[in-house]
Image: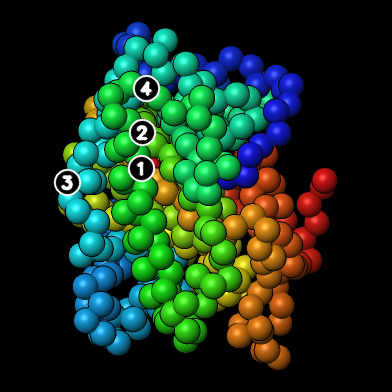
Amino acid sequence: MAPAPITQMNVGHIDDVQELRKTQSTTVPDRFMRDVDEIDSVISDSPISKDVPIIDLSKIAKGSYDEIIHLASACEEWGFFQVINHGVDTKILEKMEKLSMDFFKQPIEEKQKYKMAPGTVQGYGQAFVFSEQQKLDWCNMFALGIHPHFIRNPSLWPTKPLNFSESIEAYTREIRILCEKLLRCIAVSLGLRAERFEEMFGEAVQAIRMNYYPPCPRPDLVLGLSPHSDGSALTILQQKQGSSIGLQLLKDNKWVSIHPIPGALVVNIGDTLEVLTNGKYKSVEHRAVTNMVKDRLSIVTFYAPSYEVELGPMPEFVDESNPVQYRNYLHGEYSKHYVTNKLQGKRTLEFAKLGTHIPV
Ligand SMILES: O=C(O)CCC(=O)C(=O)O
Ligand SMILES: [Fe+2]
């Protein structure tokens, strides 16, 4: 998430979905209603796939080559996996869930002290809305840039709940260590030296977003979060215990729900790794759907190279049978492009794909 430009744009009125929920209305405002083709499969029994791979990081730590092979196939065939025995203390995960809920449960006046400005991606509100016509997601977000420090906007760091900042620091420190570990494992799974990405990434960028989806009276008409791939290299997603099942990924053209495993974290490949591996490991389109009775909270970490790093397919993934599929660009340019466009499947990656033209 590069610092986005402050622009005067008219995004229209954006309803706060928790406030809508309080009205007990049985309908949703027009702006949330999706066209039929966008939601045809939202509640048609999208299978809850227990096939999404589960990677045991403790096996890799003990040197299991089989688990590295398993990781390689998870990345290549799914772009998504759940990680267990990941080393992040359960207490830290639970604390973060409580902290996030305590934040979202506050009166709207308190949360709006940290309002996300139109066209930006940090603070409280709804990101990726750029026009009055754009449909809205049934979601309240709270997002912060974490690392390096210059991406932080201190005025958006809440003073309530108490100890919010300290808890965020503790959580993001742990998750950063996990990102580093995972990236080393992913490098090995690609036949690279473990440190290959780490050395290239420089001081990696880290951002966090909490997505809160209150129950919705018409889950059949709305989306919790529009389909997208992540602009990161790697994303780590924590689903709050007891949340509704809501995360879906597109596999073989079908939406598949991710079955939450207590204590596990969901990991997905972002656009940046797709480009670096010249499409060997692809970012996968995913979205969130809502539920009529249950709410959902996800706590999402985006981990990416430093903005000044030049990205493009690594020579290891280019040969006669694998010609270059993406152009070279600075990560900061992509990050800016990502946060200034609405979420629209894998459209954003057209920025880098050779043979596609994006209007500027
Ligand atoms: O809530 C979810 O599970 C989806 C979140 C997500 O994909 C994101 O924040 O990028
Ligand atoms: Fe995502």
Q: Where is residue 163, by image quadrant? A: top left
SS of the residue at dot 2? helix
Tag 3 and tag 1, C-beta contact below 8 Å: no
Could you tell me how far apart the alpha carbons at marks 1 and 4 are, in whole angstroms? 14 Å
Is the residue marked by circle 3 packed among few (<14), some (14-19), or many (20+) residues within 10 Å? few
Q: Which mark is residue 251?
A: none
Tag 1 and tag 4, C-beta contact below 8 Å: no
- Disc 4: which residue: 159
The x and y percentages for residue 295 are 28, 30
Callout 3, which amino acid? Answer: Lys
Is the residue marked by circle 4 packed among few (<14), some (14-19), or many (20+) residues within 10 Å? few
Q: Where is residue 287, by image quadrant? A: top left
Could you tell me how far apart the alpha carbons at marks 2 and 1 are, in whole angstroms? 6 Å
The x and y percentages for residue 267 are 38, 59
Is the residue marked by circle 2 packed among few (<14), some (14-19), or many (20+) residues within 10 Å? some
Tag 2 and tag 4, C-beta contact below 8 Å: no
- Disc 3: which residue: 91
Give the quadrant of the N terminus.
top right
Tag 2 and tag 1, C-beta contact below 8 Å: yes
Is the residue marked by circle 1 packed among few (<14), some (14-19), or many (20+) residues within 10 Å? few
- Disc 1: which residue: 169
